[in-house]
């Protein structure tokens, strides 16, 4: 099977047709993906998902010539050329077959047409000459040529890795199989639910969409949900198919008057004509601009084309806007999101998991901190109360009760949390205050919560959700309710934990804050310290409590957003909140 994945690795070409408005004509490139894995093909064509990988980039390099096309006219079938003709990048459709394709190379010799498809790998040692996905894709191109009047009895696969042409005859069995897969693909694309993931398949580790598909994670959660009704059983933990670290990172610019431009494949940050820093576009996952920072039109265009969000903060750190490219193409997920939000029982089921996870994480943070301060008092009243609130949240049947339990848990939690901070940082308060914060501790918490909301906003938007419609936070003008929903379980783990580090490690002092008429705000230097601590926390590895592998917090945010999508679409029964021990 290892050899099969070597040749049948998907997505070596650009995603032609991926994410189009599901036209009547099926792109044969997507048919290749569906033959490789029905879930992969559906994710790419019906849901518009795409993620580059080393294989896809190598595929683009292999196609660098044939994708350019040429200007020579291609004669129609009733006027065959007098001499053999080769034409690159030829687009054809066959409404009768319901197929469309861009042929890498078309060879015409009189009335005979031969499609040639380029592959980056080596030719496999198989009696059929190639694996099924490649043969089906080539045969579909042959069917298109036939419907356009050409004589086409075979095609050619050119394997660049071994520089070898392999002829594939279009016999009746291959034609029937191609039409059968095309029909099955249309049915899968029209279904509200994705085809199930492959189980323990060797195809998954090299699939470019493995981080979106989450095959092992979805299989595990689906199996565990089924076992709740049948007595339960132990299941194999997922393989670690996700990279632990995020290759690209945010670029923060808070120098007032700075100008962000594009130079080649790099972003440059300048102030009064003098370059402050630069970064490769490839290494930037998002840009965060604070206050009066300008961005050039070419930079905006390139970032939008790459799907890199631009986050606009006020000078004081308030998230004002996010600039992105076109909206995510997975409209089916947003339709289902709106249905769930309008269903009180369905939205309460997800909200219960989120709130219970948040309270559990609040209790865990306090237990760890109070253990050091009080020498292991496991019966602290706050811990007992939080455990009670968590249990009641898990079983409440009223949205209003859930909101009340979350509020009581927060009051109990912050009454102890502020006691873990140095006295100068919390002033006379012993709880949350904001708009504006009146003490340094609340100023830092508010800024960190804003950064965390920005991260979740980007995460849920990249999955295909509408960030403004949540299940716990009800819709309100200008409020990213879903991002706030998902941020709940991470507030203790990321923001509150970073706050403790900043104050107790001496990274912030009284000089890091400004006080004006009772309102407290961070200085530029203080804000830089908070951003650095926030990024360190997101880059910290943690063991996922359900899947058992270690990944950084930033990757956890993305995984949780995708699991929420699985719960919303009904692929898994419950949303599993992220909690630590």
Image: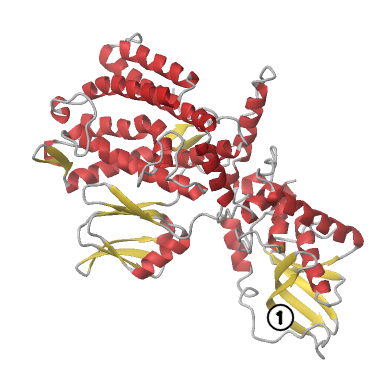
Above-or-below relation of 55 to 565: below
Residue 270 in the image, given as x and y percentages of width and height: 25, 65
Q: Residue furthest left?
A: 517
Q: Which residue lies furthest to the right in this view?
A: 172
Q: Which of 60 and 478 is in front in this view?
A: 478
State the SS at label 1. strand
- Is residue 208 something that shows in the picture? yes
The crowding category of the residue bearing disc 1, from other C-alpha atoms within 10 Å (few below 14, some 14 to 19, many at least 20), is some
Above-or-below relation of 138 to 199: below
Q: Which of 240 and 461 is in front in this view?
A: 461
Q: Is residue 474 left or right of residue 382?
A: right
Name the quadrant of the C terminus.
top left
Look at mark 1 in the image and give the residue it sits on. 87
Which quarter of the picture shows residue 242? top right
> Who's the residue at 86% across and 76% down the image?
151
> Who's the residue at 45% across and 43% down the image?
469
Q: In this view, does 1 lie to the left or right of 320?
A: right
Q: Which of 449 and 484 is in front in this view?
A: 484
Residue 480 in the image, given as x and y percentages of width and height: 39, 44
Q: Which of 224 and 555 is in front in this view?
A: 224
- Is residue 126 something that shows in the picture? no
> Who's the residue at 80% across and 67% down the image?
96
Above-or-below relation of 386 to 57: above
């Amino acid at each position: 099977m290892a050899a099969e994945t070597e040749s049948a690795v998907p997505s070596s070409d650009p995603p032609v047709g991926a994410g189009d408005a599901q036209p009547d004509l099926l792109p044969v490139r997507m048919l290749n993906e569906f033959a490789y894995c029905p879930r992969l093909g559906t994710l790419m064509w019906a849901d518009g998902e795409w993620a580059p990988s080393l294989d896809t980039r190598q595929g683009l390099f292999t196609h660098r010539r044939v994708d350019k096309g040429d200007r020579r006219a291609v004669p129609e079938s009733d006027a065959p050329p007098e001499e053999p003709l080769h034409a690159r990048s030829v687009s054809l459709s066959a409404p009768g077959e319901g197929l469309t394709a861009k042929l890498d190379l078309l060879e015409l010799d009189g009335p005979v047409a031969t499609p040639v498809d380029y592959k980056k790998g080596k030719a496999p040692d198989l009696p059929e000459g190639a694996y099924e996905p490649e043969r089906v894709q080539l045969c579909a191109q042959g069917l298109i040529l036939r419907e356009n009047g050409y004589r086409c009895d075979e095609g050619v696969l050119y394997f660049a890795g071994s520089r070898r042409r392999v002829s594939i005859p279009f016999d009746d069995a291959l034609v029937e199989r191609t039409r059968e897969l095309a029909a099955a693909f249309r049915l899968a694309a029209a279904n509200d639910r994705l085809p199930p993931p492959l189980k323990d398949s060797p195809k998954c580790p090299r699939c470019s969409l493995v981080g979106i598909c989450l095959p092992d994670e979805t299989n595990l959660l689906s199996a565990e949900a089924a076992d709740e009704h049948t007595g339960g059983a132990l299941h194999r933990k997922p393989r670690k198919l996700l990279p632990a670290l995020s290759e690209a990172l945010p670029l923060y610019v808070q120098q007032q008057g700075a100008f962000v431009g594009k130079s080649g494949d790099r972003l440059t940050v300048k102030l009064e004509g003098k370059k402050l820093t630069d970064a490769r576009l490839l290494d930037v996952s998002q840009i965060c601009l604070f206050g009066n920072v300008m961005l050039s039109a070419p930079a905006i265009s390139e970032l939008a084309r790459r799907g890199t969000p631009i986050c606009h903060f006020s000078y004081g750190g308030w998230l004002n806007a996010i600039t992105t490219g076109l909206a995510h193409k997975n409209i089916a997920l947003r339709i289902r999101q709106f249905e769930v939000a309008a269903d009180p029982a369905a939205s309460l089921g997800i909200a219960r998991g989120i709130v219970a996870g948040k309270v559990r994480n609040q209790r865990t943070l306090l237990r760890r901190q109070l253990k050091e301060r009080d020498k292991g008092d496991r019966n602290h009243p706050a811990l007992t109360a939080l455990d009670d609130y968590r249990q009641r949240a898990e079983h409440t049947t009223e949205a209003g009760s859930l909101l009340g339990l979350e509020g009581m848990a927060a009051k109990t939690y912050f009454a102890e949390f502020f006691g873990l901070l140095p006295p100068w940082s919390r002033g006379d308060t012993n709880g949350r205050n904001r708009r504006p914060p009146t003490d340094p501790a609340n100023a830092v918490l508010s800024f960190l919560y804003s950064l965390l909301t920005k991260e979740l906003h980007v995460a849920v938007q990249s999955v295909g959700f509408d960030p403004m419609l949540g299940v716990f936070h009800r819709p309100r003008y200008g409020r990213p309710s879903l991002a706030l929903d998902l941020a709940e379980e991470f507030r203790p783990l990321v923001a509150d934990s970073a706050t403790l580090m900043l104050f107790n490690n001496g990274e912030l002092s009284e000089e890091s804050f400004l006080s004006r008429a009772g309102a407290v705000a961070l200085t530029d230097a203080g804000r830089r310290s908070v951003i650095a601590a926030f990024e360190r926390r997101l880059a910290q590895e943690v063991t996922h409590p359900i899947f058992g592998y270690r990944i950084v917090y930033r990757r956890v945010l993305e995984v949780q957003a995708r699991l929420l999508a699985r719960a919303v679409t009904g692929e898994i029964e419950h949303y599993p909140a992220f909690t630590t021990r």
